[in-house]
Image (cartoon, rainbow, N blue to C red):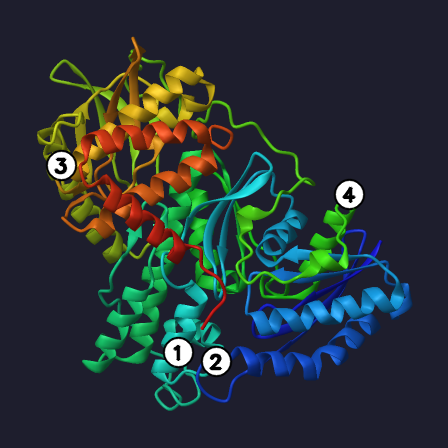
Amino acid sequence: MKVLGIESTAHTFGAGVVDDGTVLSNVRDMYVPEEGGIHPREAAEHHVRVGGDVVKRALGEAGMSESDIDLVAFSKGPGLGPCLRVGATVARVLSLKRKIPIIGANHCVAHLEIGRMLQARDPVLLYASGGNTQIIAFVKGRYRVLGETLDIGIGNMLDKLGRELGIPFPAGPKIEKLARGEPLEGILENDGPLSPRLLELPYSVKGMDVSFSGIMTAALSLRDRGADIPSICHSVQETAFSMLCEVTERALAHVGSEEVLLGGGVACNGRLRQMVSVMMEERGGRSFAPPPSLSVDNGAMIAYLGEIMYDAGIRHSLEDTMVDQRFRTDQVEAVWKRSRDLGRIVTPGTRDLEPGELPRPGEVLGRGAEAVITAGTYAGIPSVVKERPPKGYRLPELDRSLTSARLRKEVRMLRAMREAGVRTPHVLDMDEGSGRIVMELVPGPRLASVLNILREDERRDALRRMGEMVGDLHRNDIVHGDITTSNFILGSLSGGNADLCLIDASLSDRTEEMERKGVDLRLFREVYTSTHAGFEDALDEFFVGYRDRFSEAGKAEEKMKEIDGRGRYIHQD
């Protein structure tokens, strides 16, 4: 089947032709504003001017004419409304003129599906583009969002920073060049290369979510205090990309995957690709990234997804082709993909225990985003050793700073949580120099690994108890920072009472802010509905327990809904 794909979500109008999964052409024309950021109407006017020529060139490079096309696909969303409507109109005209079927494709899913060319089996997807930054896994027939930006997409942040620093649009590739200390016209052009310094910037990770707006604000403050632009670019890249690697690794551990697929325009960045590759080598897994021409916004990926959808039996009428600026990745029912049943989730290279089971000394029990957990003994007491090995993807000075701060915080906050009435493991020993903590062993599996296979009443009991524990924390003005089923150990289930132990307090904090409590709740809900799809009804039990223990639960839940609106990010400027 010969498919013409049309892309017009933001600054790029693209057209590409795919025939039976093979890309025959891929033509793009990008709108570059004279100053400032993208103005939707101006970008749409650009698309109107160049659209016909781009389509003609794509057909020509594929050795075809309009009459050869069997199907036309277009980006239905998410994106800028005026831009989306141009692409949709072009597609409708071709469909009516040639009497061929039309398919409206999700732009984000197209970025993800093009990675299937690389033979990735079941990867976690790091989708980093202008308006979207998401950590995604495929579960129960849909691409589920495990984590995302809570404010601004990574690409938009880089472009806005570039404007403030006098770097022309698109700023991302030029920031990458300056971060390496290479000359750029108007910046360093007469000075030659230099070695940029790492400057301190906010490192904002909240479980599997990230926030970038604070990085940009702090970077501009450094500029105002005299910091050089290459060092600012270097520091922004290293900090932001380290955050992306960390939340991706956390997702890998949570769903038990050994593969990462990069997608989106920012995925073209060589430093980000290198960091993800190093991360996966250290985990014994693999990373995949499409070539740059298929990572940026392009028509070929739309054609590719359109062909897959059509072959799977999906049909759209003209009435189905209305654009959707807020078309979420997780709204798409991917009937063309085989859905794996998660069942029991075990991180590769580890073994989960049964409730009450004691491990063998030296056995690896966990491998998360930060640490490796190994069974041992301490003064004759069954224990676990939590070691934070250096992360090769992070610069050593950034890695040491994070490791030291989080280790101290974990010891302090585990005690604070126990004082709030929440069961946590006792710390037996700590060595800050090696990033090592020895804690009492809590026999049992991670709740994440067994929740999908519990009986319904057991699952509800466990979730209600989780809610009670989080309510106790919030009542005492403590936020955990990574509330997921991976961070609860299930000791036993008896008599309708789940014996749970909360672990990993390295992202926790003391705060009265309802915003932070709302972030805790939102993270839990998003990750739960992604990883434990099909068991959403039991989620109500979590909030029953939460409300029972926290008198201001209603305020926190309202804040969760407010934050949720911010997290459902789309292309905007």
Report if the CB atoms under discs 3 and 1 are less than 8 Å apart.
no
- Does residue 63 appear in the picture of this structure? no
Q: Which mark, residue 411?
A: 3
* Badge number at residue 140: none
Q: Amino acid at mark 2?
A: Phe
Question: Decide: marks 1, 2 in contact (CB < 8 A)?
Answer: yes
Chain-order first, disc 3 or disc 4:
4
Looking at the picture, how far across and down is residue 381, in whole percent?
15, 15
Give the CA distance from mark 3 to mark 1. 40 Å
Q: Residue at x 44, y 29 (%)?
A: 537
Which comes before the other along the chain, label 4 or label 2? 2
Spatial CA distance of label 3 from label 4 is: 55 Å
Q: Position of residue 374 (x, y in %)?
A: 29, 26
Query: Mark 4 and 1 residues: CB-CB less than 8 Å, in contact?
Result: no
Q: CA distance from mark 4 to mark 2?
A: 41 Å
Q: Nearer the viewer, mark 3 or mark 4?
A: 4
N-term-proximal mark, 4 vs 1: 1
Q: Quadrant of residue 470?
A: top left
Which residue occupies 69% across, 84% down?
A: 49
Label 4 packing within 10 angstroms: few (<14), some (14-19), many (20+):
few
Question: In the rendered structure, which amino acid carries the disc numbered 3?
Answer: Val
Residue 158, image quadrant = bottom left
| Residue 193 or residue 306, whichever sits in front | 306
What amino acid is at disc 4? Gly
Callout 1, which amino acid? Gly
User: Which residue lies under the disc numbered 1?
Assistant: 162
- Residue 313 is labelled as 4
